[in-house]
Image: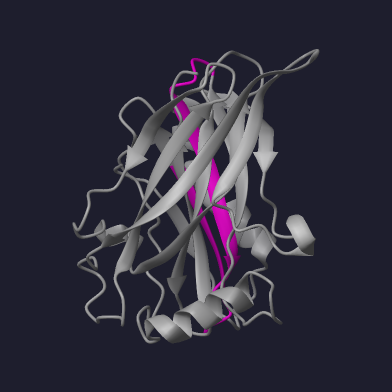
Amino acid sequence: MMHYMTHTPRNLCRLGLHAWLIALSVFLGAMPALAGDRAQADYIGFSEDGRYFAYEQYGILDGSGGFYSDVFVIDLTKDKWLDGVPFSVQADEDGPQSLADIRATALRSAQPMLAQYGISNPVVIAALNGDGVLGPNDLPVDGKVIHFGQPFYAGIQYNYTLTLDQLDAENSATCTESADGPYQGFVLTLADNTSSTTREIHRDADEQPLPASRGCALSYSLYSIIYPLESEGDPIAMVSIYTQGFEGLDRRFIAVPVGSL
């Protein structure tokens, strides 16, 4: 996996593991939330041949309170960002620009690349673990499993389950401090419930340093499954990454190609 979030939140590793576990439960809704930076995702779309995909993550930085927007364009065949990506724009806390202004500026910066690669095909959201989704016993979903089918005009076909498991990893080059416990990589496993088969679609290397751009990853969750709207194409899993920010946990996103189903 070669493409990852680029914002490296400040003071990523200030909390020990025990304090982080408490903070995570707060962030996920078990208690009133801290003022962490929870990015939102917007799906720009696919190229007509399904090879390229673009999305945006945006929000309000913890600490400074400034708005930000990052636009990513990914070659799904190579599973990497295109050169020059991301297109990132930030505003100061007291700056005159609104979040809408910042987002529009980032999208304008990305527009020549979007046009070059023909990224004009919208997405279908096949499954979503939204921020307000409740699971059994009215508890927030943990985001480690997402169940989905393949949408088509007359309904849904097939039956899949994507599972995320975490594994211990060394801290990255951008995380110079040590926590009380190991940082986390992840594994994605896809189950075809119709044929009763499974396959692994992504695995971080065991006990290896995390990519520098991922920062001090403490946890992950499955956010959504998306397909191209107007042509056949393989789905993408959007994965949330949680790191320790200045005021709480910060969330960013990576897109993981699921491959042919």
Residues in magenta, as a range? 48-72
User: 32 or 107: which is nearer to us?
Assistant: 32
Between 126 and 54, the one lying in front of the other is 126
In the rendered structure, the answer to whether residue 199 lies left or right of residue 22 reads left
Q: Residue at x 38, y 59 (%)?
A: 6
Assess whether residue 44 is covered by the magenta stretch: no
Vertical order, 177 against 51 (above or below): below
Q: Quadrant of residue 97?
A: bottom right
Task: Answer with the quarter of the image where residue 62 lies.
Answer: bottom right
Q: Position of residue 142 (x, y in %)?
A: 60, 58
Q: Is residue 122 visible?
A: no
Q: Nearer the viewer, residue 85 or 75?
A: 75
136 lies above or below 191: below
Q: Residue at x 34, y 62 (%)?
A: 184
The spot of residue 206 in percent (x, y) is: 22, 52
Residue 252's x, y, as percent?
A: 49, 59
Q: Main secondary structure of the magenta part?
A: strand
State the image coordinates of residue 148 (x, y, percent, origin top left): 65, 32
- Left or right: residue 29 compared with residue 95: right
* Residue 210 visible to the viewer: yes
